[in-house]
Image: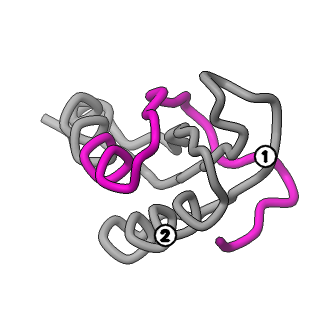
Amino acid sequence: MTQLLGTIPYTHWAYFTDEAAAKACGAELSERFDCLIDVELGERVDDKPYLLLAARPVGIGELPERHDEVQIVVQKHGGSYDFGESGWLPAGWRQA
């Protein structure tokens, strides 16, 4: 089914209370799912000021499964998963 629907660039969003946890999560996501990672300090969301962005190509028909697998890793590292959006990371991304 994925072949019929195609693949899109997709960026997952997650928030963390500390930079070390965000970077550890980013490292695991990068290793397990070949994601491009960016961790930045930003506006607090639920008292979690560190935003983790994890970008990768995703089959359109596989989005629910891809959300689930990333959410498990994010929660393992104490973060809050906020799903994502189609598209790549903002310009200027950097490896965690």
x, y (%) of residue 83?
Answer: 44, 28
x, y (%) of residue 21?
Answer: 52, 61
Compared with residue 45, is residue 77 higher up or lower down, i.e. above or below?
below
- Determine the residue positioned at 52% across, 44% down: 9
Q: Amino acid at mark 2?
A: Ala
x, y (%) of residue 36?
Answer: 57, 64
- Determine the residue positioned at 39% across, 55% down: 77
Mark 1 is surrounded, within 10 Å at the Cα level, by few (under 14), some (14 to 19) or many (20 or more) other residues, namely: few
Q: Looking at this rendering, what residue extends furthest in the top direction?
A: 46
Q: Dot 2 corresponds to which residue?
A: 24
The answer to which quarter of the image holds residue 18 is bottom right
Earlier residue among tags 1 and 2 = 2
User: What kind of element bears circle 1?
Assistant: loop
Q: In the figure, is residue 85 to the left or right of 72?
A: right
- Determine the residue positioned at 69% across, 48% down: 89
Q: Which residues are magenta?
A: 71-96
Q: In the figure, is residue 90 to the left or right of 14?
A: right
- Determine the residue positioned at 45% across, 43% down: 79
Q: Nearer the viewer, residue 25 or 89?
A: 25
Q: Nearer the viewer, residue 22 or 29?
A: 22
